[in-house]
Image: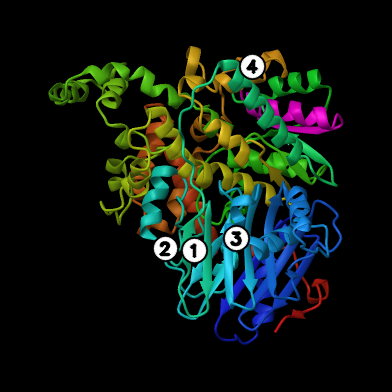
Amino acid sequence: MHMCGFVVRISGQAEKGSYKKMMGCNRYIHHRGPDQVGYLKGDYMEMAFSRLSIIDVEGGNQPLTYEDHRYSIVFNGEIYNYIELRDELKEKGKEFQTSSDTEVILALYSEIGMQFVEKLRGMFAFVIWDKMKNQAIISRDRFGIKPLYYHEDEKSIIFSSEKKCITQRIKDGNLNKQALHHYFSFQYVPEPYTMTDSILRVEPGMVAIKEIGKPLQKEFYWKPILTTSYKTEDDWIKDIKNVVCDSVEKHMRSDVAVGCFLSGGIDSTIITTLASEHHPGIKAFSIGFEEDGYSEVDVAEKTAKELDIEHHVSYLSAHSYKEELPKLLWHLDDPFADPAAVPLYFVAKEASQHVKVVLSGEGADELFGGYTIYREPISLSPFNKVPTALKPVLAKLAYLIPEGVKGKSWIERGITPLENRYIGNAFIFKETEKMKLLKSYNSIYTNGRITDAIYQESVGEDPIQRMQHIDLMTWLRGDILMKADKMTMAHSLELRVPFLDSYVFEVASQLPPEAKTAKGTTKYLLRKAFADRIPAHVVARRKLGFPVPLRVWLRNEWFDWVEELIRESEASYLLNKSFVRELLYEHAREEADHSRKLWTVICFIIWHQVFIEKKYDIEKWLTDVKDEDQQPFCSIS
């Protein structure tokens, strides 16, 4: 079992000096797998690979071949049911030369064909080359826990775990205008796009085939569908307990030290509690800020004490936060403005000094209804009784109410259809604001280009389920899991997310809406399922999220820095600097809280400095991968 990074090139024609080019690309993902490097070449394909060993399996090095070199694979991830699958395949006569989950993937594909991905329980991105058919099979896990980028032109196709490996190989690096518009709405670039025109992402739950001379053929083997089943509360609680406990147990499989990220919230507390039952010596890691009201460290410390586990706490300053931003955005590949990415980067850095694997609570909010915004349909329910003809009158009334006056926002939201009101957990700049911000604003690139088709898939469902569905298809994969993967792998640390398991989803996806938002809370049934097992002080805690003191820092420590950043930025051909300055000055005068808007612009400006202006010496951030470090050159021609 291993985390890794890989680069794969498939082409109908050879490329001069390709070996050195592939290994040059490998330097850009060496942080994802510093333990072993490998290279494989066939008639139409090349594979380069960097591995982080988690389970010390015999013959676990990659690229790995199977059935007399007919099949070759590079695989990033973990298959948690690989032992069970291997036993089933052995009964059918399959033979194995290694004890790795990688070989199980190849054996499964060899046995049952394209349906094999549906049997995989875990997180994964892989490329399989079938030498007999001269085709590649490409897939990504259901939720998008592991990333997979690609670039296709008339000559070849390149796949990689990180976008930066592909940009080293291609000449076409034009900015994607649609991605630019969406970034300033969502605070990330939604899939399948990237900020580079010619580079896309294989979407979660997707399997694809690449045949020589034909374009990539893609289809979904899985999509998140939310339904409603009715059982007694006791039956639901029993099912939730069983499936979450089983998932944590499976996610604990490792030959190296495993730790947990622990906040003051219920999700990480459930995971840490269950993990400590399997491994009492587990270590927990938390991070906080010195500013009052922006830290849950005291709650996490109390939890760790009650669980009697070793607890490591770090604190992050305004200076450290901004100093690492360029390197952090280099790791993220595209502009990304979730403020929680930075503390995650630092807590991962600390954890990597002690363990190779951490468990975390990502996904519980999306599956079990954990965001406070999911209660909005309840608060807006009175508007369901308002006649359609009366809504324009209410719109005029709301317009006359001054900004900031109580009731204005409630009326505006109440008369706005859900499809126009909710684009996911983050909604940074409205279209009217993007008109002022972007010099190349184009009204065809509205939020609806991302969300309309998703909403079509949930027509007629409960509003809470429809909001969850939007988040599962956008926010979870584009924000939550993107930062989880990139910020941990930056430190060669593997992050596992037991809530994002296909069996857990099967239970959670059938929960009725009231099981999520009953009694004025969120994640009602998840809380109740583990109320007797986790420390009592966490059970009823309101969700704090991962608050960052941006609002305070932008008015004080960071004001001069941001002003200078805006002035010196070479992104003025894209951004209206006068509008950005206006936001900064209004924020500094405490006339409004523009912290999230400003942060979204700041992250874009620094990303632009790193990737477009080439302002930073990226070579300093790379680990040298010398020729003598490589696995011997291997050919399967």
Residue 13 visible, this orientation = yes
Q: Residues within 10 Å of mark 3 (few under 14, many from 20)?
A: many
Q: Which mark is residue 162?
A: 3
Name the residue tied to disc 4: 539
Name the kind of residue labelled 4 in the image: Val
User: From which residue to which does the magenta span run?
Assistant: 266-292
Name the kind of residue labelled 2 in the image: Leu
The coloring applied to the image is rainbow
Q: Nearer the viewer, residue 341 or 316?
A: 341
Work out how far the residue at label 4 is from the one at label 1, CA to CA, in angstroms.
47 Å
Name the kind of residue labelled 1 in the image: Ile
Work out how far the residue at label 4 is from the one at label 2, CA to CA, in angstroms.
46 Å
In the displayed structure, 441 sits above or below 14; it is above
Q: Residues within 10 Å of mark 4 (few under 14, many from 20)?
A: many
Q: Secondary structure at mark 1?
A: loop
In the displayed structure, 260 sits above or below 40; it is above
Work out how far the residue at label 1 is from the one at label 3, CA to CA, in angstroms.
17 Å
Q: Earlier in the sequence, mark 1 or mark 2?
A: 2
Callout 1–callout 3 Cβ contact below 8 Å: no
Mark 4 vs mark 1, foreground winner is 4
Callout 1–callout 2 Cβ contact below 8 Å: yes
Give the percent coordinates (x, y) of residue 347: 70, 39
Q: Earlier in the sequence, mark 4 or mark 2?
A: 2
Q: Determine the residue positioned at 32% across, 21% down.
A: 404
Magenta stretch: includes residue 277: yes
